[in-house]
Amino acid sequence: MVHPATRLIRRTARDQWRLLALATIGNLGRALLEGASLGTVYLAVEVASQGTLPAWWPALTPLPSQRLFMLLILLAVGLKAAQALLQYLSSVSVEYVSARCFQRIQALIHQRILEFGFGHASSYRVGDLTELANTGPAAVERQIAALNNLFTQGLMGVAYLVVLISLSPWLLLAAAAIGAVVGVLQRHLLPRIRRTAYSLSHTGVAISSRLIEDIQGLRLLHSLGQLDAAVASFQAALDAQEQARRRQSRLTAALDPLDSLLPILVVSAISLVSVGAFGARVSGVLPSLVTFVLALQRMNMVLNIVAQSFTSLNANAADLERLNRFLLPSGQPFRRRGGVPFDALRQGIRFEQVGLRYGPQEPWVLRQLSLELPHGHTLALVGPSGAGKSSIADLLTGLYEPSEGSIFIDGHNLGQLDLGSWQRRLGVVSQDTFLFNASVAANIAFGCLGVSRDQIEAAAAQAQATGFIAELPEGYDTLLGERGHRLSGGQRQRLSLARALLRDPDLLILDEATSALDSQSEWLLQQALANLERQPTLLVIAHRLSTVRQADQIVVLKNGQIVERGRHEQLIEHPQGLYRQLWNRQSEQQEFVLSPEQTPFC
């Protein structure tokens, strides 16, 4: 099976074939010029030691030895200069291809995260996804670099082998001995390097995740006095990473000293028997030996780079495998695409025997739920925590698909509608509001292209947000910081509500949207909703029962099922009913209670 990262590299290679062809030609030219430069060095040493060239160079033989030597040296320099130019062109070409792969992999990771179904995407920790977005493209880049090194150095190695064979088979045996020793060392070391790399990869992910979680949870850590415990836990993870890095360094560093020692041993041995190696050709001993030492040294450099490339490939295997597992489409739930376009809500919403659970082995969150929300009406969901109220909103917004039953929008099954077009007609305000590190105006206008500043300010006024916005340093142009940390919870909720109202939604979902507002602000907000020019269909989820007294229908949930439904006046008449119990409890505690004239919710 071809892995996704490999497939992307191949596709990029096909698209960038001109660059790869240029790199290949450059590498071939480098290898040929390397052989030619070594031959030129051989001839220069021959001239320096014997004063003339062999008889098979008749055109240059009549030249004076000094001039001939300088000519050969200049030729060697010219060959190396041409080789350097080809190396530059091939390196730039490969880097261009690598940069394109890096960009495509990063875009693919981002796209895959957004393509996942919400339930599947939210099962990942933020730190895991952040780490993957950083290490994935880098792993592909390292893979390309290592493969390019293997190809390039392979060609150079062939050039050196040709030179060594032309000098003496004994020299070839010496080079083969070096290669054999390095190969044996790699065979024993590489599996251990690979295992340690996997350990390092997992440890790095854990550290990144813990760091992000500690930053996001600073308030909780401070509030619960868990700062020392967080430091100790993070330090333990760092200690584990340090030990893994030390093991890896001991393994990877073992090859370099051996690679440096072996050529010296071989050169010394060959030097001692050089006369025997070259037979009676005494006149060729010095140039052959000099050329051999030079070629063997460069062959050793090639073998060293090849060994490092194999080490890099094995060390990179863990990150690359993790990237491929993430990118493999099999077994991963993706966001639904396509379907019947949605333009406007005209009739209403209907749930028929809907059930929901978040996994095959998970308990049912909703079961056999049937209800209707006619167009222009207000439906309120109340009940104890964990009753399934927010799960109904999640189903309506398409974050999850029903595990059983169906949801109908104007008679069309929600599962057959184009999810994007449906979601663009929704306004959602939740208790856990999210704001971007952008200006106030940009946060309100998010998702609404082409809106004017007047429309933004009108939405803010409807959400009772103009007062605190005017007090900000730069008003609507004030940057809010990460997740809007400069604002209070109530202020963040009002901006989120302004964002929802600016969309002029067909369905407005308020999931504990006024939980952080004081009673006066909530009453003003309800008045603003009542005075909207076009009344949206409202789904209100609330613990504060006084906010839903005027709803057209109140549905009471318990353990994922409907236990009561009706208007406030009807439900309050049942002494043993759950709604009456909740109402009496809140009334006795005098929490979040408004006078009847202050609750015109519609």
Image (tube, rainbow, N blue to C red):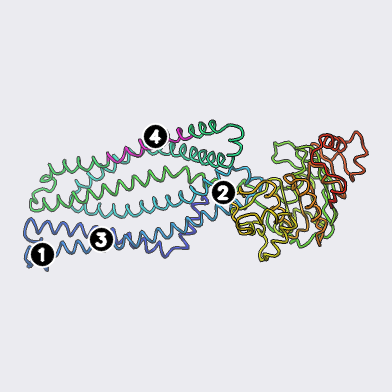
The residue wearing badge 2 is: 328
How crowded pointer 4 is (Cα within 10 Å; few <14, some 14-19, many 20+) is rated as some
Real-space CA distance between mark 3 and mark 4, rounded to the nearest whole angstrom: 41 Å
Q: Who's the residue at 57% across and 32% down the image?
A: 226
User: Which one is earlier in the sequence, the residue at label 2 or at label 3?
Assistant: 3
Q: Who's the residue at 48% across and 44% down the image?
A: 319
The residue wearing badge 3 is: 33
The reply to whether the C-beta atoms of the residues labelled 4 and 2 are less than 8 Å apart is no
- Give the residue type that dot 4 points to: Arg
Q: Which residues are magenta?
A: 237-258
Real-space CA distance between mark 3 and mark 1, rounded to the nearest whole angstrom: 20 Å
The reply to whether the C-beta atoms of the residues labelled 3 and 4 are less than 8 Å apart is no
- Give the residue type that dot 3 points to: Leu
The residue wearing badge 4 is: 247
| Foreground pick, 255 / 205 | 205
How crowded pointer 3 is (Cα within 10 Å; few <14, some 14-19, many 20+) is rated as many
Real-space CA distance between mark 2 and mark 3, rounded to the nearest whole angstrom: 44 Å
